[in-house]
Image: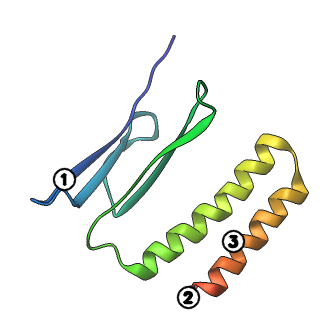
Amino acid sequence: MRKTQITIDVELDENHVPENMTWNAQDGGIEKEPTKATMISVWDDRKNEALRIDLWTKDMQVDHMKMFIHQVLLSLSNTYERATGEEDVADWLEDMAEEFAQKAAIKM
């Protein structure tokens, strides 16, 4: 069996707020790539619930966070369609992402 690793290194300030983050993906050739935000979701099969970690650096701009959330919502639509084949629900999720972009006044 082959194993690989994806890691996120987080530097915290004295108040435990992320100051710097980098991520690494062995198979993707990514090493110490800087990032300002990350969202990780994992499925707990025993409890039937999603667990998540949301981190962003204190210098992450609000406009960038809005764009990040918008793009995550769009990717959820794509993932949902690939996982379920339910194009109508995926389209609804995409529409919701676009409505979010309008309400959040995202400049694209």
Q: Quadrant of the C terminus?
A: bottom right
Instruction: Name the side, left or right, on which 81 lies relative to 42.
Output: right
Q: Earlier in the sequence, mark 1 or mark 3?
A: 1
**SS of the residue under disc 1:** strand
Mark closest to the chain's N terminus, 1 or 2: 1
**Tag 2 residue:** 107
In the rendered structure, which disc, 3 or 2, sits on the residue that comes first in sequence? 3
User: What amino acid is found at the position of numbered circle 3 in the picture?
Assistant: Ala
SS for callout 3: helix
In the picture, measured across the screen, residue 102 lies left or right of residue 38, that is right
Q: Quadrant of the rendered structure where residue 72 is?
A: bottom right
The image shows residue 21 at horizontal and vertical percentages of 27, 55
The disc at residue 97 is: 3
| Image location (x, y in percent) of residue 36 | 34, 64
Mark 1 and mark 2: span between their CA atoms? 30 Å
Seen at 87% across and 45% down, the residue is 85
Element under disc 2: loop
Q: Please indicate whether residue 68 sits to the left or right of residue 36 in the image.
A: right
The residue that label 1 is drawn on is 11
Disc 2: CA contacts within 10 A as few (<14), some (14-19) or many (>=20) = few
Please report the residue visible at 51 percent of the width from the left and 10 percent of the height from the top: 1
Q: For the residue carrying disc 3, how many other residues have a C-alpha within 10 Å: few (<14), some (14-19), or many (20+)?
A: many
